Image (tube, grey):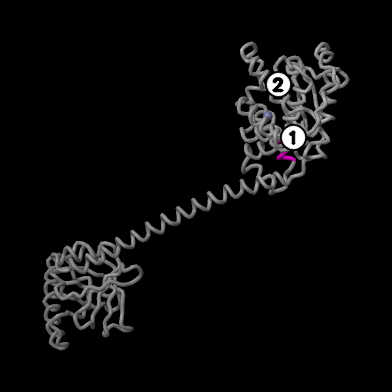
Amino acid sequence: MGRIAILDRIEHEHEHENRDAEYEKKQHRSESHVLLQRNPAMVMPASRESFQGGVFHASIPGGRSGATLSIARGELIADTISEPSLRFSIPLNQCQIDLGGASNRMVFCRTKEGDLTIFCEEKNFAKELDFQSGGMLAGPLKQLKKGLAADANRFRFWLTLSAVACALLLFVGYFGVLWTAKIAIRALPVSVDEKIGTMAFSGMEMGRKLEANHPASRLVQEIVDKLKPHASIPELKFKVTVVEDKDINAFALPGGQIVVFTGLIKEAKSAEQIAGVLAHEMSHATLRHGIERVSQSLGIVAAIQIMVGDVGGLVALGAQVAQTSILTSYSRAAETEADLEGARMLNAAKIDPKAMADFFEMLKEKMGDLPDAMAWISTHPQHETRVQSIQNHQKKLPVVQYEPLQLDLKAAQDAL
Ligand SMILES: [Zn+2]
């Protein structure tokens, strides 16, 4: 059975050769081979691979057909997928290589006359063609490779460009949102500051709060009342609380909540020095440093909350931030701002701003004795430059007749 099959094939191959010769004669084409193949299963492609491609030829109904390509015995062979299958071939040494299709990936092999074209878009086709042609087609194929490399480069270029553009967009978007958040937070009414301050205050662990009628509380309240009319945000409700604590400390929460430690009142040399600290802390509130700090810490979260109108959520988160970060420190720029605005308020209230600078000097001297109790100075560093900047600023302020505070500091200190 096997033997018969082989013989049959040999016979068929002879038949092909004969037909081939006949066809050539008929067509007067020596360069290209076009042969009719009735039984393609009998043809054994000699190339290691076959490729899916196509053929253009006038003899094909419609002028073109898909084909299975192979390379054998120095020829590019195409067996059309049409029924009946037609076989076309072009000797490799007569192949006119052209590139085409989208991004030049398609390889066209044409006869010199251009009447027969076999084409393929498969990746390894050019490689196989190059290999089988023994370098004959190296030149045109090299061009193809170059084209592909250029494509890859172009692709890489656009990929890089898109990546850069995306990164840039993200960058701009992120900072744009942050910038918007900063403006949006600034645009929020101070009642939001007050809510954050009140919530932060109620959640903070502090020493015993002195009664409002305690001499120390009354002294501090009277100073605040004297400074209040000169605050840059008149509607801000300052609320001052004196807390039992040996630390020399005072701080302001957003919205005008101010906490003064008994340690600070005890160590102050004059009511004016306390006024200096209070003016500084009140300025943090009027300059809205607290809520600015909140927006810095919450960043994008704050922006999103404002955008979706979730002020309640912002207040809750802001209170947390206020409790933790505001007590540690503001930025140096914020501190300078509070110093200068404080000096302005003191000057307007006819209190010598020098008292604020004096307080810094006093703390500096005390540093050696009470390093642990220097909470305020630790969050307010750079006192030499600050004293200097307060003094310089004072020269620019309107000249006023300073009036000493008619307050009994001694009595307040004795009551502690
Ligand atoms: Zn400060």
Membership of 69 in magenta stretch: no
Is label 1's Cβ within 8 Å of ligand 1?
no
Per the image, the residue denoted by label 1 is 344
Could you say which quadrant of the image residue 341 lies in?
Answer: top right
User: Where residue 356 appears, x then y in whole percent?
Assistant: 71, 25
The residue at 26%/63% (across/down) is: 146
The C terminus: image quadrant: top right
Which stretch is magenta?
A: 312-316
Membership of 315 in magenta stretch: yes
Residue 172 visible to an observer of this rendering: yes
Q: Nearer the viewer, residue 113 or 378?
A: 378
Give the mark toward the camera: 2 or 1: 1
C-alpha distance separating marks 2 and 1: 22 Å
User: Where residue 65 appears, x then y in whole percent?
Assistant: 31, 77
Q: Is residue 256 left or right of residue 322?
A: right
Give the image quadrant in which the ligand numbered 1 is located: top right
Could you say which quadrant of the image residue 281 lies in?
Answer: top right
The residue at 62%/33% (across/down) is: 331
Relative vertical location of residue 186 with respect to residue 416 in this rendering, above or below: below
Q: Is residue 124 left or right of residue 371?
A: left
The residue at 65%/12% (across/down) is: 370
Q: Nearer the viewer, residue 143 or 345?
A: 345
Q: Nearer the viewer, residue 40 or 118?
A: 118
Per the image, the residue denoted by label 2 is 249
Relative vertical location of residue 145 with respect to residue 35 in this rendering, above or below: above
Q: Which mark is residue 142?
A: none
User: Where residue 227 appears, x then y in whole percent?
Assistant: 81, 31
